Every structure is written in structure tokens, then in C-alpha cells.
Amino acid sequence: MRGCGSRLLWLLVLSLAWLGPALGDEEKDGEVVAEEEKEKEEEEVLSDEIKEEDHVLVLHEHNFARALREHQLLLVEFYAPWCGHCQQLAPKYVQAAAELRNESSPARLGKVDATAQTALANEFGITSYPTLKLFRDGNRTHPIAYTGRMDTQGIVRWMQRRAGPSATLLKDTDTAAAFANSQDLVVIGFFKDLEGKAAQAFYEVAAEMVDMPFGVAEAAELFQAYKLSADTVCLFKKFDERQTDFPVDPEQGLDTAELTRLLRVHSLKLVMEFTNETSNQIFSAKIPHHMLLFLNKSSSEQLSLQDGFKAAAGTFRGEVLFVVVDVSGYGADVLSFFGMTPEDAPTLRLVKMENNRKYQMEQDDFSDTAIGTFIQAVLDGKVKPHLLSAEPPEDWDTRPVKVLVGKTFEQVAFDETKNVFIKFYAPWCSHCQAMAAAWEELAERYKDREDIVIAEMDATANELENITIHGFPTLHYFPAGPGRKMVEYKSARDVETFSKFLENGGTLPVEPPVVTKTPGNGTGKEDPSVLGTDESRDEL
């Protein structure tokens, strides 16, 4: 047995002696392969070769210059892999790239991982994601910011307008007539000199307004056919008035911003109906006031009120947008914003869009004369806004967090004996919900202090005359004493920081700066989930 054991031990040692070098060689070979693969990857990164993923050029600092040389029109997305907005854009961007390739367009799409390609991100001032920039004719120093919609068709149309003429040249009356009738909205610029400044400005507008076709004409017969004697931009519509003319000022020339505004305003129907399809048009029109007619479309009697409403609209075009809201349809969702129910219809409201102030007639009168008189009085500052206010709960002042409404706000916030800290919130706001526990704990901590009040107000159900809330949550501090002072709190939303703010009389004590690296976002910006920045507020 002993000899057998020695023999087995000898065989084991011998086998290890044989296998040892082989295993060592295998490990060494693996290291060599890994090193070679690493070198290959580095060579690929260092190479100026341009690879594609789903028709999108994959760019980095070593092939970026080559991409600019080879592609006359290159739209580049600077993205971060963890960015939710970038992830949402990705399939739309890929589809846009495919459509442009299928039409053999000179326009190409590329992408840069800005978190990995920091040199490029710094060169082009990338501070948020996604950021899209257009590089034309290899110009690296002056890229053009993307201004189109963040969807497939928005990207495709925006690039098409830059790949070819932004306006179609119309040479005769038949071509012009066919073009003017080709869609619901068509813009044609009539210019005596297509090389002049006015025409060039028109081309700039056409390049930006990709949602409607633009044509251009200089033939004398076309000026005569459309009864024009000087440079004019005409908007053709298949609703309301057929043709709206915007003459070019011979001294001032054509202002691109003003022409864009006029085309946006007049491309809307004189009276819009608030629907899922039109809501984006209504809110992006940049018309400062909206006049709303709330009615129930299932009632023929209420439908007849639209006649007087429309008759009043023409006088205020561009200043007031007239909108019909069906309380039994899509418009039902906005009734709570006005403190209304379907039973309140028919009724009228005017909204000043810059601050969401609402104005109401003392007695609804649906004649065009009454509507016009009311609107003019609001525009002249002769009507006070109609402010929403909920009813105060019976126990509103017995809880640690005092519950304020519009009717009780003044007496609490401007009590000269109290320092009042108020949270303005929306019930649906996730950021408000996230800080609710901290606000309750803060109120518990100060509930026995006679000079400090912790309160909250639902800003969706209550409105204040001189304070406008633009996002949620918004925190305001009203110090004791005369003068009706108000301080907006914009720091961290935790109990200890709140307490320091209160104990220091409405300011935070100056502390030595702490240099930290914020993990996760790779931008060096504060994490909005921790700090009270605008990024951690839900906007109205």
C-alpha cells in the first residue's frame, strides 16, 4: 500500500510537471489575446473610420473631422446613455435617419456619447441632453442649434428644408394655383428680386417653419394674378378667409420674427375648438390672452352661442385667441383648473397667459357686442381677476401644518407677529409628495413656537392676486413685521436645512463650500432630486 501511494504521488507530481507549463502557456496565451483585443479596440477608437448603427453615424473625437469633411449636412445628437429623454428620442432618431437615407438625401444623422467624448462635449458647450446641432459644409466653429420637433417627422422635415431650397420656385399661374391649393395652409412669398434681402429673410423663415409648405414667386404675371403691386407674403387657407396678405415694409424690410409670429397667429382658425389634436397649437401660438366659451355640444341651444362668439373674434385677432371648450368632451379635463363643473356651462372666461389670471363677466352675456366690451375692459386693466379659493377645512389651524386657502391666505401670511413658511403644492406633483414627510416633521418641530407658522396651500385650487406660482413645490417665507415681505426658498428640501433657514431669520448661514462629485449624472450639475432647483419642480 505504501509503495502504491508513493507511486501515485509520483505520477501526480509528474503530471503536474507536464501540465504546468501547458497551463501556464494557456494563461499566458489568454493574456496575450486579451491584450491584443484591447489594443485592437484602442486602434478602432483612435481610427477615423466611421461606423454606423441603424443608419446613424457613430462619432468620436478621432472621426468627427472626417465626418464633417464627408457630409455636407450633418445633424449630431450629443447624448448620455442614462438620459431618459435620449432613450425616448433614440427610436425616432433612428427612423428619421432611415427615411433620409431612403430618399438619398445629402443630410445625415450622427450621434456622440457626450459622457465618453468629453473633449467634443466641451468644444461644443454641451450642458444638457439630448442636444442636437447641425454642421453645414464642414463648418466646425459655428454649428446651428436644432429648433425642430423631437420626433421623426419633425427631424426629417427640418433636415429636408436645409438640404434643398426652403421654398419652391413658382414660375406661372397654373403652378402657383396648384401649389396654393395643395394643402390647408400654404405660404407664398412674392418678391421682385429673389436675391434681395427680403427674399433671403423669407427663405430663413421657410427653413424654420417646416410644418407648412413655402413657395416663392417673382414673375410679373403672378403679381398681377394675385392683385399685388409690391413685395408681399401671402398665407393661403382652406378655412376662414382664403388669402391673408402681409406686405413687406419698403423701409424696414422683412422682420423674420414678426413674420413668423403673424403666420403662426393667422394659421389658426378664428375660433379654435379645444381638442387633443389642437391643444398643442393653442398653447404654442404665443397669443397673450385666451377667450374661452364653455358649452355642452350635446345641447343645440348652447351650440348656437358660437355665432356671437365668432363675430367678436375678428377684432382681437393676434391679441386674443378664441377657443370653444366642450364640457361634455375633451374639455372636461380642464374644468377643475377654472373651479368649474359641467353644470356651469354655458359660461365665458378670459385668461391672461403670462400669469394664468382668469377674468369673468359679472353676468354672462353671449352677444358679440358684450363679449367685445368685456375683453377690451380686461385689456385696459379695468377688470379685476377672478381668483379661485377653496373653503377652509374646519380644523385648518389646529394641525401642525396649517392648511391655507385663498380666503385665509392674507390674514396668515402677512400677520406681522409671525414668521410664516408656506409650501405651495399640487396634489398630483411627485416632488411635492416626496417632501411631504419632511414638511410634516418640520411643523411638528415648531408647533409650540408662537412666532413660527408652517403652512401649505393647494395652488391648483387657490389663487392669489399678487403672487403667481409657476411650478411645484414653491416655498415662500413671510417674515414677521411690516412691509409685506416675501422670500423664496431655493435650497435643499430636508428638515435640518429648513430649520437652519428658520432659525437664521429667513436666510441660510454661510458655510464653507464642500466640494463633492455628484454620482450618476456625469454632468457636474446638482442632482435635482436632492436640491430645490427648478429641475426638481413640476411646471404648470
Image (cartoon, helix red, strand yellow):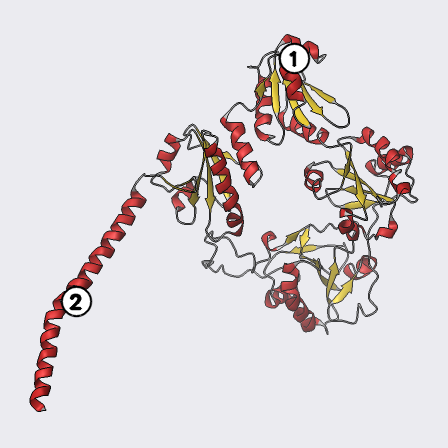
> Considering depth in this image, is 158 or 114 the residue closer to the camera?
158
Q: Which residue is at 52% across, 36% downward?
A: 145
- Residue 289 showing in the rendered view: yes
Pick the residue in front: 524 or 180.
Answer: 180
| Residue depicted at x 78% and y 30% | 317
Quarter-of-image position of residue 238: top right
Extreme residue in the bottom direction: 1
Classify 10 Å Cα crowding around label 1: few (below 14), some (14-19), many (20 and above): some
Position of 397 with respect to 170 (left or right) is right
* Amino acid type at mark 2: Leu
In the displayed structure, 94 sits above or below 216; it is: below
Q: In the displayed structure, would residue 11 be above or below residue 185?
A: below
Distance between mark 2 and mark 1 Cα atoms: 86 Å
Residue 229 seen in the figure: no
User: Which numbered disc flags the more N-terminal residue, 2 or 1?
Assistant: 2
Counting from the top left corner in percent of width and height, residue 199 is at: 59, 18
Residue that numbered label 2 is attached to: 23
Residue at image x 18%, y 59%? 29
Quarter holding residue 413: bottom right
Q: Pinpoint residue 31: horizontal percent, then vertical percent.
A: 21, 59
Q: Is residue 112 left or right of residue 220?
A: left
Element type where label 2 sits in the image: helix
Question: Disc 1 marks which residue?
Answer: 173
In this rendering, the answer to whether 383 lies above or below 460 is above
Return the x and y of residue 112 as percentages of the image width and height: 42, 43
Where residue 359 sits in the image (x, y, percent)? Answer: 83, 44
**Residue 206: mark in rendering:** none
The residue carrying pointer 2 sits among few (fewer than 14), some (14 to 19) or many (20 or more) residues within 10 Å by Cα, namely few
- Amino acid at dot 1: Thr
